[in-house]
Amino acid sequence: MDSLFLPRVARILEVRDETPDTRTFKVKPRDGNGLAFKPGQFLELSVFGHGEAPFCFASSPTRPEWIDVTVRRTGRLTDALHRLGPGDEVGVRGPCGNGFDLDAAAGRDLLFIGGGIGLPPLRGLIWNVLDERERFGRVTILYGARTPTDLVYKDELEVWAERGDVEFLVTVDRAEPGWDGTVGMVPTLFERTDLRPATTIAYVCGPPVMISFVVQDLMMRGFADERVITTLERMMQCGVGKCNHCAIGHCYVCRDGPVFNYRQIREMRE
Amino acid sequence: MEPRPTRVIAREQVDAWLARLLADSQVIAPTTSEFGDEVMAPVSSPAEVLWRFTNPLHPPKQFLLPQTEPLVAIRRDGDGWQARTLLDERPRVLFNLRPCDAAGLAFLRRVHEVEPPDTAVLRRAAALTVVCLACTEPCPQGFCICSGAGPFAVENFDIQLIDLGDALLAEAGSERGAAMLAAAGPLFRPATPVEMRLRMELEEQAKRGFGEETCHFASAMRRVSTGRVEETLWSAMADWCLECGACNFLCPTCYCFSVGDRCEDGGYLRCRTWDSCQYAAFTREASGHNPRAAHGDRVRRRFYHKVSAQYFQRDGAVGCVGCGRCVEACLGTTDMPAVVAALRQGVWRG
């Protein structure tokens, strides 16, 4: 019998710098088997000797050759992870959480709104949608970051911008030399696209402040609260609804979430 | 309800029975530590087992959920890192456990049954045999009668002992308990009608001993579950909480934990360790953001988890067995009965 806490050993295949403090790690379980996950779910990633922490799957299950995990260096465990490179081993445990409901999104227009380091959970979902493009209506991706340096997946942003079947708009709060794109917070992009609240599901991920003003804006523009979907973040330990760190009322972000629609979030009580 | 198989053992035979239990498994019982404290600890002879004692300050939860429990052994060999599940399911008899603590263990077992079940904990729970000793008088701080956990247990035990003076009545509360009584053979004999009547009288007498002071969970639950508690009430209580975590660590039903790696020769042990929802770091995220930065929010969290209808529905009981340990240990005044009274009255007197 295996413990709920038993990690599988995985190998780092490649490490890519995204921003000065953020890297994407391509990992693959050493036993060769993948993890059957859905976009929006997360894994507990171990750096042996430093413990484990939850990170979203940043890649799509439609591309199962490896798992992408995008991590900002911000503490003891992520410091240790950033010191690792190709060939080094980490632990993976999961998938944890509910994930996005892709079947409910089928046939609808999809609006992805990402802020800064909030793009990774959306990126897995976006690639899943693009790999099954015919199942969905219009696809719009709006992405914002503080500065051009803080944009993650820069190569892919260009791919999305060039695709004819995706509308992609990007903005930064503060321009830097060489930036000739939009400047302003994410909602400034709302004016540049044709929002269709009646037929669209909006997926919003980013820093808490950004989520709250984006969601307010979407509400004012007529989005129903159950069609605005986000992922919640909480301090987590176990990832399986036992340790109580991530509880909001009697709801466990790790097990019942992290994906919630805005109606569910409004009804949370503690 | 089916009448329980009920047997009687003479006082002078108890040691012989205990000696048999000791031969088969580890026996954990109230005993006197080398420093003179009454504690729950493994005993090696029947003489070490206490029969008249104040319920030890530390509940027996450590025998189901150790304060620090190794979960996974992590080692490096020629093929790289290896991770291996660690299990501890040694048979243990918890002897002379009080009914409140038996209820606490049953509560902890139930919360680990919630999907996805923690099979390691459940298997350890299954290896625990509970022989509880009914309370014939209330303990100084106890209010088990309010949470239905005592003074006599109605469930959650394999055997319940009731002290009749020169003999002990033994009720089997499970098949395992009935089998244990059967296995003890002639050490036990059937109970007489007089003894059964005495048992009922002792229970009634114990219940009467609780007096007027009670802990009204129902009205507190109504207010907590519907969010009808003034924000200022929680922050006023927080002023009287020292955030020491003693209430959590001594509570027979608290089970919050953290997971971390400990260095061990040649590798690491991934361990879970008790944690406290009253600590600010409990919810502090890597970014520094803390959704429960306000101390009052943490006090509210503790009592939402303990007495809300939402958790009651999930766990089948309030998260309190009325043992009174938080009353004894709290350096401030935010123990369960005091907070429940404040929630009910809408006033905090500190």
Image (cartoon, grey):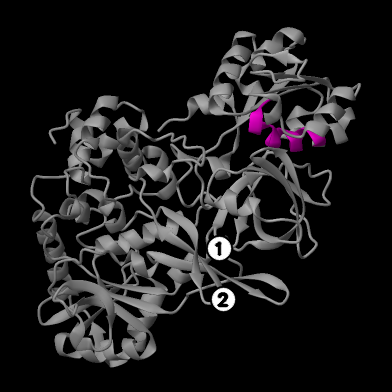
In the picture of the structure, the residue carrying the numbered disc 2 is B266
| Most common secondary structure along the magenta stretch | helix
In the picture of the structure, the residue carrying the numbered disc 1 is A49
The residue closer to the viewer here, B65 or A56, is A56
Please provide percent x and percent y for residue B33. 19, 78
- Kindly state the secondary structure of the residue where label 1 is placed: loop
Residue lying furthest right: A164
| Residue type, mark 1 in image | Gly
Please provide percent x and percent y for residue B71. 52, 67
Residue lying furthest front: A177
- Kindly state the secondary structure of the residue where label 2 is placed: loop
Is residue A116 placed above or below B310 in the rendered structure? above
Subunit of label 2: B
Q: Which residues are magenta?
A: A114-127
Residue A50 visible somewhere in the drawing? yes
The residue closer to the viewer here, B146 or B270, is B270
| Residue type, mark 2 in image | Gly
> Would residue A34 appear left or right of B53 to someone viewing this image?
right
Is residue B331 placed above or below B267 in the rendered structure? above
Subunit of label 1: A
The residue lying at 66 percent from left, 24 percent from top is A147
